């Protein structure tokens, strides 16, 4: 009866600060003095720090080299590490069930400090869900957007008249007497005499008269050299 009464008195269902003999995981560690409290606080800090360290290692897939070479060994290693992490979490939950305010403060402080160092080691990842608002364009900008041509303007390319196919066709037609001068080949013969078409044999005087304005145009009959002398001789 006395032992059961003392055990009931040792259990508290509310937060307390006194040294009431609460056990900390093991029967040999109980908070009945300042030394017992410090020993319990040290055990609590060790359990919390080890749990945070193994959790960090498990999340970053830390494993020995010989484990990484085998898929089965890697799975066994990670399963064992997970079991140890869960056991450590249950351990500091049991410590928290002692309802001792001092041990609870040590537990929370140790977890917070370890998490702080874990965050320092973890590289910062950009949040993909963050977005920045895009300002809406003004009415003038929208109007200018609709007025913008769909295709880009092509650069202006200068083509020499003598290099143009149309100019060459017009020059050929003019030489053959099929068309008049056009704006592309107007004066081509005077500006570029070295590229003019050659005269036909026997049409030199007629072409010369047409250029000087004395003649009415080139005759279609060929000019025979020495024809007048023969005719004069015959008449004589």
Image (spheres, helix red, strand yellow):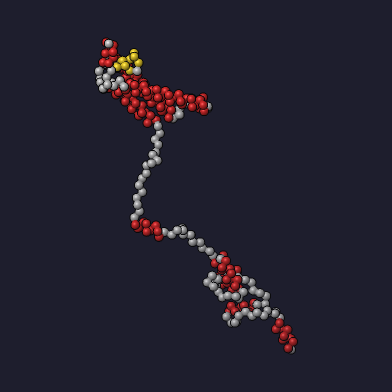
Tell me where residue 129 appears, x and y as whole percent. 38, 41
Residue 27's place in the image compared with 14, above or below, is: above
Task: Describe residue 23's horizontal placement relative to residue 181 as left or right.
Answer: left
Q: Give the camera-side residue of 61 and 14.
A: 14
Which residue is rendered at x = 28% and y = 14% of the image?
A: 7
Front residue of 182/110: it is 110
Q: Which residue appears farthest toward the bottom when viewing the image?
A: 236
Q: Indicate the position of residue 146 as horizontal and vertical percent values.
A: 40, 59
Residue 209, image quadrant: bottom right
Image height of 230 relative to 160, above or below: below
| Percent position of residue 207, x then y | 62, 77
State whether residue 133 is above or below residue 32.
below
Question: Where's the C terminus, which quadrant?
Answer: bottom right
Q: Is residue 33 visible?
A: no
Q: Residue at x 59, y 79 (%)?
A: 210
Residue 134 is at least partly visible in this image: yes
Q: Is residue 193 left or right of residue 47?
A: right
Write the residue at 55% across / 71% down: 185
């Amino acid at each position: 009866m006395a032992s059961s009464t003392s055990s009931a008195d040792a259990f508290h269902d509310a937060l307390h600060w006194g040294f009431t003999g609460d056990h900390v995981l093991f029967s040999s560690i109980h908070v009945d003095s300042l030394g017992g409290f410090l020993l319990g606080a040290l055990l609590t800090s060790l359990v919390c720090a080890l749990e945070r360290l193994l959790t960090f290692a498990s999340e970053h897939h830390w494993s020995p080299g010989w484990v990484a070479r085998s898929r089965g060994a890697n799975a066994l290693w990670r399963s064992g590490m997970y079991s140890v992490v869960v056991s450590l979490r249950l351990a500091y939950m049991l410590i928290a069930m002692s309802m001792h305010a001092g041990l609870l403060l040590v537990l929370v402080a140790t977890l917070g400090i370890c998490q702080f160092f874990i965050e320092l080691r973890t590289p910062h990842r950009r949040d993909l869900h963050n977005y920045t608002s895009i300002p809406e364009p003004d009415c003038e900008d929208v109007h200018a957007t609709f007025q913008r041509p769909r295709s880009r303007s092509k650069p202006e390319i200068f083509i020499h008249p003598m290099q143009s196919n149309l100019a060459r066709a017009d020059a050929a037609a003019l030489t053959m007497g099929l068309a008049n001068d056009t704006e592309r080949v107007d004066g081509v013969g005077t500006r570029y005499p070295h590229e003019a078409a050659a005269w036909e044999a026997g049409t030199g005087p007629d072409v010369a008269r047409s250029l000087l304005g004395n003649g009415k145009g080139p005759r279609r009959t060929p000019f025979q050299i020495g024809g007048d002398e023969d005719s004069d001789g015959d008449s004589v």
